[in-house]
């Protein structure tokens, strides 16, 4: 189990343990030539991933899975085009953009199971039919009844004070909210430091029900990436930080004004997933942008697009 996330704690960059300059794959015995700074080395013969264990000895990652690529080049371009054009103010963006390089790679992600508990408070504007005062998680029936009675008295007083029947009565109420969020996520953390800008941060999830044991023969000769982000770093920094973002986003759907939030994520031992990722480069009105698409589901993992484009 991990430790509760403290957003005020100083962030320390975790460096991957140094790999020997030459070693053998513990799975097939083939030679490995790890590059500088790598934490995960993919065997070019059998596809097994070797990492440095806590004791300093090289070991093969046992929980290593993959997803099958189901998209052709044309299907990937179509999925990217639909995403670019999504929205009333972005019609024809794809047609008015210049397509650059399109590449398919198998990219390693740490899948980090994370339990999130968050306590928050704020205010919510409510109309007729809602109680006044404090809305609390787990309110009793007596409290709800008291709130309803208070609201009825407030409405009666407002109506009595109105001198004109046609004059609208202001029924807008500001209610204080204190509640708790509990969520479970399988957070994907990209294990290649140079791909940080492609990290999904809006709750994207791979379809793990379709995963299978990693078999390099199933990649179709597509480039399989090694990685330089350790599982410990993925758990303690990246997953914990994303948990805070997800909880805050969820809290803002329950209040109009979020005043404070305390997030307590707990991360658990995960697994390594090599996912087929389509990288697309394009330019819109001279501005370079990108899209990355999950080749298994056809969903956009992350990307850039104009906020609007009418011509």
Image (cartoon, rainbow, N blue to C red):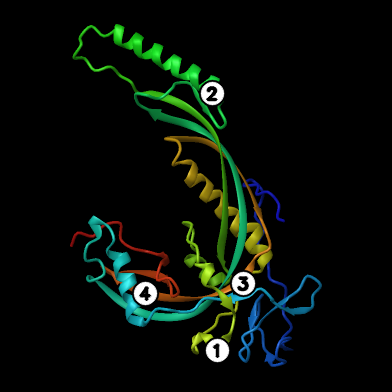
Where does label 2 land, which residue?
141
From the viewer's perspective, is the residue at label 4 or at label 2 nearer? 2
Marking on residue 280: none
Q: How far apart are marks 1 and 3 (CA)?
A: 18 Å
Can the viewer see residue 14? no
Where does label 1 land, which residue?
217
Where does label 3 land, which residue?
272
Name the residue at 42% across, 75% down: 279
Name the residue at 38% across, 28% down: 126
Mark 4 and mark 1 in contact (Cβ < 8 Å)?
A: no
**107 to the left or right of 128:** right
Q: Distance between the residues labelled 2 and 3?
A: 48 Å
From the viewer's perspective, is the residue at label 2 or at label 3 nearer? 2
Q: How far apart are marks 4 and 3 (CA)?
A: 26 Å
Can the viewer see residue 55? yes
For marks 1 and 3 on the same chain, the one whose residue lies earlier in the sequence: 1
Helix, strand or loop for disc 4: strand
Q: How far apart are marks 1 and 2 (CA)?
A: 61 Å
């Amino acid at each position: 189990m991990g430790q509760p996330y403290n957003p005020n704690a100083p962030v320390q960059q975790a460096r991957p343990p140094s790999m020997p300059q030459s070693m053998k794959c513990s799975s097939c015995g083939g030679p490995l030539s790890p590059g500088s700074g790598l934490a995960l080395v993919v065997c070019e013969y059998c596809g097994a991933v070797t990492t440095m264990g806590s004791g300093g000895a090289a070991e093969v990652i046992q929980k290593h899975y993959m997803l099958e690529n189901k998209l052709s080049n044309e299907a990937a371009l179509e999925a990217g085009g639909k995403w670019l054009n999504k929205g009333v103010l972005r019609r024809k963006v794809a047609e008015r953009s210049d397509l650059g390089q399109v590449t398919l790679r198998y990219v390693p992600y740490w899948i980090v199971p994370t339990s999130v508990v968050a306590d928050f408070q704020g205010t919510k504007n409510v109309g007729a039919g809602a109680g006044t005062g404090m809305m609390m998680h787990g309110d009793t029936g007596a409290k709800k009844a008291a709130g309803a009675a208070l609201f009825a008295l407030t409405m009666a007083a407002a109506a009595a004070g109105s001198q004109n029947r046609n004059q609208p009565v202001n029924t807008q109420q500001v209610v204080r909210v204190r509640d708790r969020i509990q969520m479970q996520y399988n957070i994907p953390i990209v294990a290649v430091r140079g791909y940080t800008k492609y990290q999904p941060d809006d709750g994207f999830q791979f379809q793990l029900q379709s995963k299978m044991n990693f078999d390099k023969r199933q990649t179709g000769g597509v480039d399989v990436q090694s990685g330089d982000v350790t599982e410990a770093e993925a758990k303690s920094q990246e997953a914990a930080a994303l948990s805070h973002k997800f909880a805050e986003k969820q809290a803002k759907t329950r209040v109009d004004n979020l005043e404070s939030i305390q997030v307590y994520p707990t991360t658990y031992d995960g697994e390594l997933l090599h996912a087929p990722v389509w990288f697309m480069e394009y330019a819109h009105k001279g501005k370079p942008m990108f899209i990355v698409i999950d080749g298994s589901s056809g969903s956009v993992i992350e990307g850039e697009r104009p906020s609007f484009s009418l011509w």
